Image: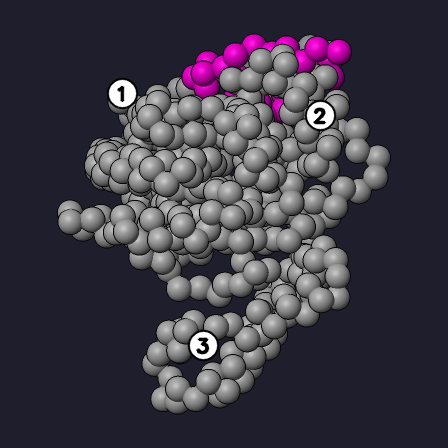
Amino acid sequence: MGFGGARQDGRQPLILRAGSVLCHARALGPDRMTPRTALRQNAHLAQPSPPVPTAEELICAVLRGEHAPWRWRDEPDAAARLFEQANAHGVCALLHSRLASADWPPSLLQSLRTNAIELAMWETRHQRVLAKTLAGLDAIGVRPVLVKGTALAYSLYADAALRTRGDTDLIIPFDAQQKVHAALLALGFERVLAVSGEFVSYQASYVQQTSDGSSHTLDLHWKINNSELLSRLFTYDELAHDAEPLPRLCAHALGASRVHALLLACMHRSTHKQNPYYVNGEAHHDANRLIWLYDIHLLAGQLNEGEWEQVVRLADDKGLRAVCLEGMQNAQARFHTKYPEAVLQGLAMHSTPEPPALYLGGGKLRQQWMDFQALGSFTRQLRFLRELVFPSAEYMRAHYAASPSTWLSWLYIRRALGGVVKRMRARTAAEPQHADR
């Protein structure tokens, strides 16, 4: 069965959801007709007032290419609230690109314009940093594969600055960690201190402060995810085999294929059911961040029939059918994304629970237990626990630099007690909260 589908550019006009229900009065005789009953009987002839959309609905309408008039003229702070929400969703630059002739408040349009200029300036500098970095890694025989934001920015978006992000994710061969680490230090990056080990983490962050004051972060992965269970779903070799050049970025840039990119986008979205994302230091708990769903929307518009077949087959092989279906449906709900019906049917045919879906849909304790089980042998589990409970002395002394005591044993005790308190707070926050009656 084929999976052909029409291409999309995300701009076609679409029909807004109906916001009212027409009333139908039963027929009344002339002697019983009143102005009120006549109005009710002819309600189908009236034009109902459209409902006032939420800020997110208005943003989505703009991104769908629809006419979206401003609805909050009597609310002075509505413009600031919408900007904050658009910023949290990572779509300010996209909004600015679509609102040239909108009747929105001038203050909001100016805020979006200022934000778009800042993002464009950062993108120019980030592109230069990446080009130099990828050339340096190529010189030592390493070809990273870019995934998520930056790869999509330079393959899907007309202007890379429209794809807001705070870093660049790239995956390298497992055995290239040490030489890549040395190369990044030589290129002016500093490694961000974090808990590390053979099993406790499969990534490291590197930051470079450029002379103009801008900051550029690389998230370096040697496995696709820090979760032991999820880390095995996509290897560097698999992604590199199908990777596609990103000539708009630089001659040495490779990005994950469109098929892999769609599966990774859906998986990445699901990881944020439990893990917050941060904007300007503020934590946000929302797996349906609009920029992630818009990535899915644009990717769906690029896939051809053969690629859709690969999506269904790979999702089945990796246990990601439910995860992909959920991500795609959430994108469709907001952007009216079109998918081949056979694809949706194929993804919906998961008769038994898939481990990745169970993992991503579970709470923190379930995820930790599933990761612990995925380690397999008792020896590996013990080594993982040791890395988790006893991080390196370098990390402990740096993390607790402000502590009055630098005695290492005390620092480990303090870390353990802090972990207990953190878990208790998380459990309390997860309990149902009842309003006073």
Mark 3 or 1: in front is 3
The x, y position of residue 254, in whole percent, is 43, 29
- Counting residues from the start of the chain, the first of labels 1 and 2 encountered is 1
Amino acid type, mark 2 = Arg
Specify the label residue 313 is tagged with. Answer: 2
Q: Which mark is residue 101?
A: 1
Tally of numbered tags: 3
Chief secondary structure of the magenta portion: loop
> Can you tell which of label 1 and label 2 is closer to the viewer?
2
Around disc 2, counting alpha carbons within 10 Å, would you say few (fewer than 14), some (14 to 19), or many (20 or more)?
some
Asked if the residues shown at circle 3 and circle 2 are in contact, with their CB atoms under 8 angstroms apart, the answer is: no
Q: Amino acid at mark 1?
A: Ser
**Rendering quarter of residue 26:** top right
Task: Tell me the number on the disc at residue 395.
Answer: none
- State which region is magenta: 1-28
First of labels 3, 1 by sequence position: 1
What colour-coding does the image apply? one colour
Q: Residue at x 52, y 18 (%)?
A: 301
